[in-house]
Amino acid sequence: MPENPTRARTRGRGDIGRYVNDTLRDRYFAACDALYAMGAPARSETDVETSFGTTHVYRYGPADPAAETRTPVVLIHGAGGCSAQWYPNTPALSAERPVYALDTPGDPGRSVHREAMWQPERAAQWLDEALSGLGLDRVHLVGSSYGGWLVLNQAHRRPERLASVTLLDPGGLEKVGLRFFAWVFVSLFATFAPKALRPRLASWLEQPVLVVPELRAMVLAGVRAFRIRRPAPLPLTEDELRTIGTPLYLVLGKRSLLVHPQRQLERVPRLIPGARAEIVAGTGHGPQIDHADLVNARMLDFMQDVDAPEGASAPGAVDV
């Protein structure tokens, strides 16, 4: 079988994510499709060309034609996965608004990565080009984990298209510490534990991957199939955070190991006036998975407040 042309061009480059081979890639896609089937059905899929590669986009839409006119939601997933990670969120969000879920180039997914984009200005350029290619001039941008860093970076560097930003246990607020990498390693190791032990490990680690078979299968297939080639992003400085004027909603897991939740609950609204922040109990790094109904409702309420003629409701920090 001839070698994939894109993989041949990028082989050996240390800054381009790539699949190990086509067989493992196809197995990963099959695992992703099983997870997509648990969410809302995509109305369409499209590819958008950018300076950094081809971005694959899933489009979800409300059944109510009147809701099509509302400001759309754009979802940016976390590192090491694809937009299938949004399966608990697409049904509720797309019932109220148009929704676009992007596969980030450089992570496993159906996008094609050709040029490095881990640098903050390049990352902002990629996302702006992707939104432009979709014809989106005003969006509610939502990001989880590494996707949260992409969203926060966008609000700092290229906020012109942003109606609001929502950050779900995001990167970009603190330097990624050893405790987070240790959690990732232990969680991955725990995926190989006997099935009977996984619920107890999932509770201890706050790790939904262990108890959702389709999610576990996708994560394991992605680890085998894809090689990420980028450094962990550096957090924004306090001066950079102070530049953000876009309405912002921060959701933190109480047991997060990526950030110190209580510290950020106080810090972010202080640095970004008007920001809304809250901690969700009973979860770690995945509040939108562990407590999907709650987080979906809160996100939609926030977006509605932003879109309302009177503007966003009163800011604040909440621990729930």
Image (spheres, helix red, strand yellow):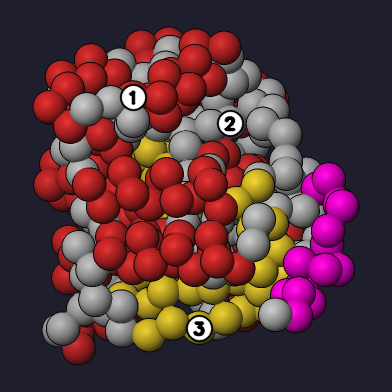
Q: Residues within 10 Å of mark 1 (few under 14, many from 20)?
A: some
Q: Which residue is mark 3?
A: 46
Q: Which residue is mark 1?
A: 190
Give the Cα distance between marks 3 and 2.
29 Å
The residue segment tinted magenta is: 2-15
Q: Position of residue 36 (x, y in %)?
A: 29, 65
Which quarter of the rendered picture does the N terminus lie within? Answer: bottom right
* Quarter of the image where one finds residue 60: bottom left
Between tags 3 and 1, which lies in front?
A: 1
Residues at discs 3 and 1 in contact (Cβ within 8 Å): no
Q: Secondary structure at mark 2?
A: loop
Q: Which mark is residue 217?
A: none
Q: Secondary structure at mark 3?
A: strand
Q: Which residue is mark 2?
A: 172
Relative to 252, say whether 80 is above or below: below
Q: Amino acid at mark 3?
A: Thr
- Asked whether residue 115 is in view, the answer is yes
Q: Amino acid at mark 2?
A: Gly
Q: Residues within 10 Å of mark 3 (few under 14, many from 20)?
A: few
* Quarter of the image where one finds residue 20: bottom right
- Looking at the image, tell me whether mark 2 or mark 1 is earlier in sequence order: 2
Left or right of residue 43: residue 55: right
- Asked whether residue 290 is in view, the answer is no
